[in-house]
Amino acid sequence: MTTTAPRLGNALARLLILAAALLGTLLAGAAPASAHAALTGSDPKDGAVVATAPKEVNLTFSEQVAMSADSIRVLDPAGRRADTGEIRDLCSGSVVRYGVGLRAGLPDGTYTVAWQAVSADSHPVAGAFTFSIGAPSTTSVALSEQAPGGGLVGALYGIARYLAYAGFTVLVGGGAFVLACWPRGASVRTVQQTVVRGWLTLTGATLAMLLLRHPYTGSGKLSDAFDLAGLKTVLETKTGAALTSRLLLLGAAALFVAVLFGAYARRTDPKEKKDLSFGLALGGTVVAAGIAGTWALAEHASTGLQPGVAMPVDILHLLAVAAWLGGLTVLLVALYRAPSVERSAVERFSKVALGSVAVLAATGLYQSWRQVGSWSALTGTRYGQLLLVKIGLMAVLVGIAWISRRWTQRLADPTPRGTDEDPDGDEAPDGDEAPDGDERDGSEGEGSEGDGSETSGEVGGSGDPVRAAQLARQRAAVATARRKRERDADPERTGLRRSVLTEAAVAVVLLAVTTVLTSTEPGRTEEEAGRAATASGPAAVPDRPIDIRLPFDTGGVDGKGVVRLNLAPGRTGANALHIFVERPNGKPLDVPEIKIALTLEAKGVGPLPVAPDRIQTGHWSASSVQIPMPGDWKIQVTVRTSEIDQTTIDKNVKIG
């Protein structure tokens, strides 16, 4: 009983559907552009209430960022620019800080600080926060809810990144498979087409990323992809230089492909072929390492801990991935379209794959330590969780590869279709062409299955071109059916095809996870940013009084007014509290009673009652108001304007 292997068209269609579905799911579930450089502090701080307008706004980041003239914007309550537009570089040593000056004479109210930059690993980052001068107020500022690098442009850029990785894998791995494992594959048309398509995919994806880079890190508008001024700006950045270098190296890769499938495939002299093989291997390795280096120089490996070690390790990691998964892709194509692939070629690839897995394990372990850094980050951050998924997929892939290796050991090496003097099969026809024996079998089959009135020779001599064409199609169909029967009659080869197809399917999933992983904030960075934010606290600027204004309405006679509170110095420890009760026209309002309570809900502290003393009409005060710890405190004010009319109003204030 024989097992019918699936057709290549259906198998590739399933792989493409799986890749598209998985990539869409991962990109939809991920943040459009995760922050790789995090904002760790600001002056004024988020939510701070300052007594007087500061001269400038400063931002501190966890790692180096690229700033443009419009990277920091300060907007007043009406949405107008309150900054001077001059970005100041305040970096010192390991401290990454930038600032922007503020205009003089800013009125009281709530101001919005919106910032956007590009982190050192090429990913756009953005955010916003508010601070108040004098007292908080309403603001008309409405910022875009779209995350940096999100929307349609972000989705297209993410797809281009995936296709770039896939194209690199097939191009490099396919070339390595032909040179190291199956030299005869250089003359097989489907192998040639697969490697060339890898080159075309990588080139097209790189061009798309270069055009989309400006809107991806800026406006988010697809129309800006053809902005020449924006493209010029991109070319001056580290990422732009990396993409340009990749295109230049792809020119050298095109020459490699042309020689591999041209002069090398046609060589018959063993010595000449060996010399050319050495030259191709040396040149191809240099070009492949250079292309891999364009990722290492512009992304995660170029920033953070030990970049001098991380970049060559990243290059080795990418080359190992390409040698394994790219070679696997070409082997899959060869098994389905060129059934005569020799057992020796499969065994050589098995050794290459084993070496690639060893390199991946070593380099992956180092990269995991560098990007994650702790067990808590491995399970508590998105990067760590994706890394665990990737490790699981790698384990599955290695298991399937072990099954493929078992099938390889059971595989019977077919008799070469060439002569006995051609043990390597270099002169055998490729999988797209039927051998002469198949053609003869096909013609004999026509004679035996015809109606007996004509033979193929007689029809050929009759000069009927329609009948001759029909018989030619029938002979081709019979030859194809015969080859299929021979292929399906080999259960070991069928089992190998299926296990390799399963490997390729898992590899598609693995590549998609890797693409999302490279655009996700590393766990180490995320945890460090969280610790820095906690250490800095959400407090107001130290040693600056906190002034807030709270309108109230008790509903009775003289029930409307404003409570103005002043807490000095506005930090932990003892503070002096002054309360002023005013009518809507600003004149003092005498009220029978006013009570204050402080609550730190995040820590479960409070409410802490404060009993102020009446100083004079509309003025109450309390000394030694104790603030036990920094945090986001809720200040509740209860105002009673008559025996039955009272109301409670509250406001959250960050106190340091």
Image (tube, helix red, strand yellow):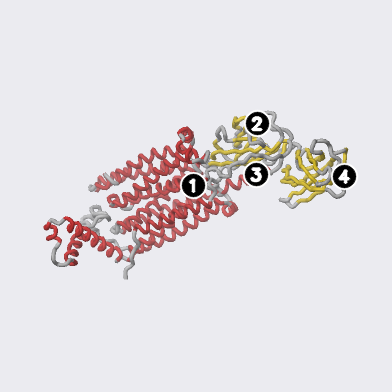
The tag earlier along the polypeptide, 3 or 4, is 3
Measured from the top left, where is residue 541 in percent x and y?
71, 38
| Quarter in which the N terminus is drawn | bottom left
Which numbered circle lies on residue 533?
3
Q: Residue furthest top?
A: 104
Instruction: Name the residue type under label 1.
Output: Ala
Instruction: Name the residue type under label 2.
Output: Leu
Instruction: Name the residue type under label 3.
Output: Ala
The tag earlier along the polypeptide, 2 or 1, is 2
Q: Is residue 420 left or right of residue 292?
A: left
User: Tag count in the figure?
Assistant: 4
Looking at the image, residue 523 lies above or below residue 251: below
Kindly identify which residue carries mark 4.
592
Kindly identify which residue carries mark 1.
155
Q: Secondary structure at mark 3?
A: helix
Q: Nearer the viewer, residue 611 or 540?
A: 611
Does residue 313 appear in the picture of this structure?
A: no
Instruction: Name the residue type under label 4.
Output: Pro
Q: Are marks 3 and 4 in contact (CB under 8 Å)?
A: no
To which quarter of the image does residue 46 belong? top right
Looking at the image, residue 320 lies above or below residue 399: above
Q: Which class describes the residues within 10 Å of circle 3: few (<14), some (14-19), or many (20+)?
A: some
| Quarter in which the C terminus is drawn | top right
Q: Nearer the viewer, residue 33 or 500?
A: 33
Which numbered circle lies on residue 102?
2
